[in-house]
Amino acid sequence: MEKKGLAGAYIFLIVLGVIALIIILFAVFASNSSNNSSISGNVVKVFQDCKDVQVPYDEIETYIENVAYDEQVPLKYTTSKSTEYGCGELFNHESCYTIRVNNLDTVGGTFQMSCKVQALNRELHDTDSGYVKPGDFKDFVCQVDTDFGEDNKLIYDINAPTKTETKHKDVQRTRTITKYKTEQQCN
């Protein structure tokens, strides 16, 4: 019987050791969970799938454009005048001046000449016009009624015809263009 009693004591000690081990493990587990209880909320570690993407945006761009336009310009010419000479009838003295117009341009046109002769206390006026071919000349006559021997001064003006020339100028313009920038996009 002693062996039976001793065996029962061993079994009792083993059961008691197992119970103590379970209590210790439970205490350690409960202690660890009570330490985590001081953190507010849940801690969740989330892994995100991120990548760089090109995102379009609009921008206003300023640029210079060379633009053609038409302009009316006078023909190129030169003039030369003669000295005064007497013209008209015998008893009706007139002073005449010849103004030569040389058309230096590549196109022809009708030139108009207006003249003013200043004599003693008066101004006398005349006009003349005519077509002048390119590279050619025409003599325009300014003829006014003056007194014989009177001092005169000629002032004249030539009104040249015009031609259309295409010219170019730089014009500042704006346009909207789409550009792209890199942004990180996560799912």
Image (cartoon, rainbow, N blue to C red):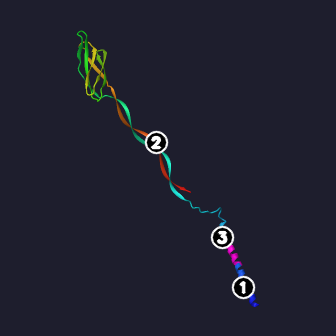
Q: State the SS at label 2.
A: strand
Residue drawn at 38 percent across, 34 percent down: 69
Q: In this view, does 87 lie to the left or right of 12?
A: left
Residue drawn at 29 percent across, 23 percent down: 131
Dot 3 amino acid type: Asn
Q: Are marks 3 and 2 in contact (CB under 8 Å)?
A: no
Q: Are marks 2 and 1 in contact (CB under 8 Å)?
A: no
* Viewer-nearest of discs 3 and 2: 2
How far from the left and from the top, in percent, is residue 148? 24, 12
Q: In this view of the protein, which residue sits in the foreground, 150 or 65?
A: 65
Q: Which of marks 1 and 3 is nearer the N terminus?
A: 1
Q: Would you name the residue on which mark 2 appears?
A: 175
Is 21 part of what is drawn in magenta?
Answer: yes
Determine the CA span between mark 1 and mark 3.
33 Å
Q: Quadrant of residue 129?
A: top left
How far from the left and from the top, in percent, is residue 9? 74, 85
Q: Would you name the residue on which mark 1 appears?
A: 10
**How many marks overall?**
3
The span shown in magenta is: 19-29
Q: State the SS at label 3.
A: helix
Q: Earlier in the sequence, mark 3 or mark 2?
A: 3
Q: In which quarter of the image is the C terminus?
A: bottom right
Determine the residue located farthest toward the top in the rendered image: 91
Q: Would you name the residue on which mark 3 appears?
A: 32
Residue drawn at 35 percent across, 33 percent down: 166
Q: Quadrant of residue 3?
A: bottom right
Q: Which of marks 2 and 1 is nearer the N terminus?
A: 1
Determine the residue located farthest toward the right in the rendered image: 1
How far from the left and from the top, in percent, is residue 10? 72, 85
Determine the CA span between mark 2 and mark 1.
97 Å
Dot 2 amino acid type: Arg
